[in-house]
Image (cartoon, helix red, strand yellow):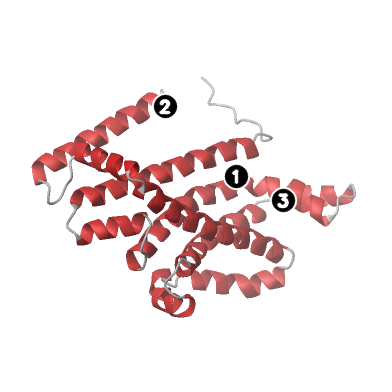
Amino acid sequence: MIVTGRILLAIALVLLWQWGYESSGELFFASPISVLRRIYDVARDGSLWVHAASTIWISCFGFLIGFVAGVILPFILYQSERATRAIEPAVMASMGIPKFALAPLLILWFGIGDAPKVVIVAFMVFYMIFISTFSGLRGVDRRLVVMAQIVGARHLKVARDVLWKSLQPYLFAGLKVALPRAISATIVGEFLVADRGLGYMIEHSRQMGDTTGVFAGIVIVTAVVLGLNWLLERLQGWALAWKPAEAGPAH
């Protein structure tokens, strides 16, 4: 039933897309058929794989940095209420800084290569993972921690078997938001400065007035996000296999 619903939704979106093309013309919309042909062409000549690999590499590298920092810092702060009260407000305040406004400074500091884009992605991911991890830690029943300590569990075992497992549902909720944000941050960074990547592909097509190229880039990015989200769902199913399934509503 779920698969059928997804297929029907996809068909409806394609029909709406076709209607937009027929109503507005090629200047504003590209036809689905022409977009598929363009994707086939760039896949056949190899340029698609070069651009996609660049975008995925930057996204994953920045994502990994932001993820690690966003998980470790809450665990450190969890050990000290004073440290939490001192550092958490600063972290939350810095969250309001528009990250892309820092792009000129990042380019000045790191040059025009991949580093500025990686930093922006890492920042975008860090805040979402930090919030979800901290929320998960605060939601852990303290009695479980005390009981584990009473039976002789050391700090590392408590962190791994009690805290880590308890916060995983919160963490995966944050990951599902952070993952597409990492891709979109990379794309926007490639709009600003890049000579390859899906963002560069879209921006170059826009500058050339190539509406089909723009739509092809958007479709490819969407496919990448859906693919990575599918992998994340498989990882979530594996990681939360220990968690008992919730009972459905009574009939």
Mark number, residue 127: none
Residue 98 on image: x %, y % = 41, 71
Residue hosting label 2: 2
10 Å crowding of disc 1: few (<14), some (14-19), many (20+): some
- The tally of labels here is 3
Residue 163, disc: 3
Q: Amino acid at mark 2?
A: Ile
Residue 128 position (above or below residue 220): below
Asked whether the viewer can see residue 96, the reply is yes
Q: Is label 1 in contact with label 3 (beta carbons under 8 Å)?
A: no
Q: Indicate which disc, 1 or 3, sits on the residue closer to the N terminus.
A: 3
Relative placement, left or right, of 162 versus 33 is right
Residue at the image point whose x is 10% and y is 46% from the top = 24
Query: Which residue is at 41% across, 60% downward?
Result: 185
**In the figure, residue 76 lies in which quadrant?**
bottom right
Query: Which three-letter amino acid code belongs to the residue tagged 1?
Result: Pro
* Pointers 2 and 3 in contact (C-beta within 8 Å): no
Q: Is residue 236 above or below residue 158?
A: above
Q: Which residue is mark 1?
A: 169
- Residue name at image x 31 percent, y 56 percent: 201
Density class for disc 2 (Cα within 10 Å; few <14, some 14-19, many ≥20) is: few
Q: Secondary structure at mark 2?
A: helix
